[in-house]
Image (tube, rainbow, N blue to C red):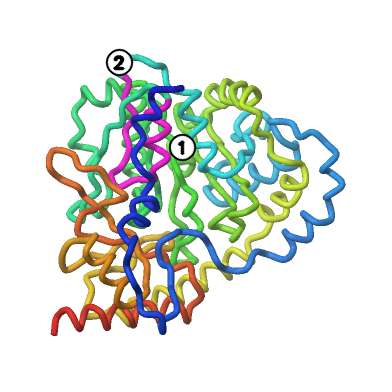
Amino acid sequence: MNRALDLLQPYPFEKLRALLAGAQPPADKKPIALSIGEPKHRSPDFVAEALASNLDQLAVYPTTAGLPALRQAITGWCERRFGVPDGWLDPAQHVLPVNGTREALFAFTQAMVDRNPDALVVSPNPFYQIYEGATLLAGAQPHYLPCLAENGFNPDFDAVPAEIWQRCQILFICSPGNPTGALVPLDTLKKLIALADEHDFVIAADECYSELYFDEQTPPPGLLSACAELGRSDFKRCVVFHSLSKRSNLPGLRSGFVAGDAEILKPFLLYRTYHGCAMPVQTQLASIAAWNDEEHVRANRTLYREKFAAVLEALGGVLEVERPDGGFYLWAKTPGDDTTFTRELFEREHVTVVPGSYLSREVDGLNPGAGRVRLALVAPLAECVEAAKRIRSYLETQQG
């Protein structure tokens, strides 16, 4: 057995189940889960139709590199979305389909880490738990950068010592962030690229929430945007991860892609060939349809805008919380301990949220998620508003 498995901490939802064990919520209140970030909006009918109409492809072995048509569709989307000049991205070298970002982030870390006692993988804190688990199982050590309110919930990259950058092999960034919803500014992305060049590490940009934003006229930049502005046509040391799960409400399709530095993707493709994780052909064909359409994505953003506006209005004056830059989470400050808040809210109002301390690690006596909870606005509008009203009721009772 791999001894590194003993290093893995319980997943946040396992901790949440333990926290709520034995709690007796009111039977007359329907349960509302704001805990798991699983999109609940309707999946696009045309994607389901593309999937169903190609079920004959079940008889075909898929290739790990994917269909040329899918890689071309992804390339076109990247060019349109992030302003990448035509011809910079070669579909055959710079794009690789993957079975969702979770699988890809984990596999990428296994392939990229050069095991040695000093190897570090740097990530934000709080963070998506896969970053940590993948790091430990790859034989490296995680190094956490706190995301605090005073820095816009982004890491203070200027405060990172050169010695950490020297040991860093992969820098994970997440923009918009999970759970904070904070965007990494374009100038910061450029600064990170310069640091990667200076210290020879790879930037792995998890951008699976990039299509959930509020201003239709100002899509948030990504790592590819920074490469385009810098004239970095080889995307050296830069790799991005995208998914159809949040963008297109297709979490069950397990479809995404990795794009960027061809010198990195070539050995990653070799790893994946042995790993045995090729995307089924019918899934690839359905994915082409999704990447080529933006109308359903705009409609999806409209639904989230409506929910954020309604929920924030309902919580006004009783809970310290602000609309994020993007994503579908609220990162709310609790009036007291976040675990107590979570359990009491469940017991009294039958609403489930995630304690922020479960999404972070304590470093030097500081857990940047402590005293906060994550609320996923994935349920239908009426349920989200009802949950907000119950949270308000709970807080007003506490304050009274």
Residue 117, numbered label: 2
Residue position marked by numbered label 1 in the rendering: 227
Q: Is residue 126 left or right of residue 113?
A: left
Q: Quadrant of residue 215?
A: bottom left
Q: In this view, does 280 lie to the left or right of 33?
A: right
Is residue 194 on the magenta stretch?
no
Magenta stretch, residue numbers: 119-137
Estimate the spatial distance between the alpha carbons at disc 1 and disc 2, rounded to whole Å. 32 Å
Residue 179 x/y as whole percent: 35, 55
Q: Is residue 252 left or right of residue 228?
A: right
Considering only order in the chain, which callout, 2 or 1, is on the residue closer to the N terminus? 2
Residue 176 x/y as whole percent: 40, 53
Residue 48 x/y as whole percent: 74, 60
* Residue found 69% across the figure and 31% down from its top: 65
* Residue found 72% across the figure and 54% down from its top: 289
Q: Quadrant of the C terminus?
A: bottom left
Three-letter code for the amino acid on which mark 1 is drawn: Cys
| Residue closer to the observer: 298 or 174 | 174
Asked if residue 26 is positioned above or below residue 295 in the image, the reply reads below
Residue at the far front: name it: 22
* Residue found 37% across the figure and 67% down from its top: 352
* Residue found 49% across the figure and 37% down from its top: 105
